[in-house]
Image (cartoon, rainbow, N blue to C red):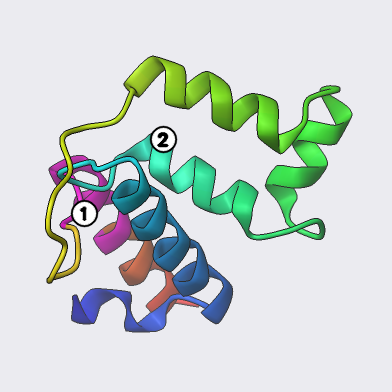
Amino acid sequence: MNELQNLTPRAHKVLELAGKEAARLNSRSVVAVHLLLGLIELGDNGVAQNVLRKAGLSAEVVRAHFEGLIGTGARQDYSEAIPYAPIIRWVLVRAGKEASNL
């Protein structure tokens, strides 16, 4: 996705972590929940972690909640990158275009 080259290294790291979350849950595509889990996984100094702390939640509680909601799919072979869901792809393309305008 060339449109994403203008995203920050931090944003690329979130996308990488989201893909890992999707693979861990045996999902067929990266969806919004995986992006949220990727943001949470980013670490203690991330915005998502700060929001969770202020809400009195832990990353583990949020992760368990979403895993309970979406469950895990059948085991899959991920020899290639997991694709983004259409709406996520659209959002990422828009974000890349906006980033190039900065």
In this view, 13 is above or below 27: below
Three-letter amino acid code at the position of disc 1:
Arg
> What are the residue bounds of the magenta stretch?
83-93
Q: Nearer the viewer, residue 75 or 68?
A: 75
Q: Which label sits in the foreground, 1 or 2?
A: 2
Q: Which residue is mark 2?
A: 33
State the residue at coordinates (24%, 75%): 3
State the residue at coordinates (44%, 72%): 99
| Dominant secondary structure (helix, strand or loop) of the stretch shown in magenta | helix
Q: Which image quarter holds the N terminus? A: bottom left
State the residue at coordinates (73%, 56%): 46
State the residue at coordinates (31%, 70%): 97
Where is residue 60 shown, x and y percent of the image? 68, 33
In this view, 55 is above or below 44: above
Q: Which residue is mark 1?
A: 89
Q: Which element type, helix, strand or loop, lies under badge 1?
A: helix
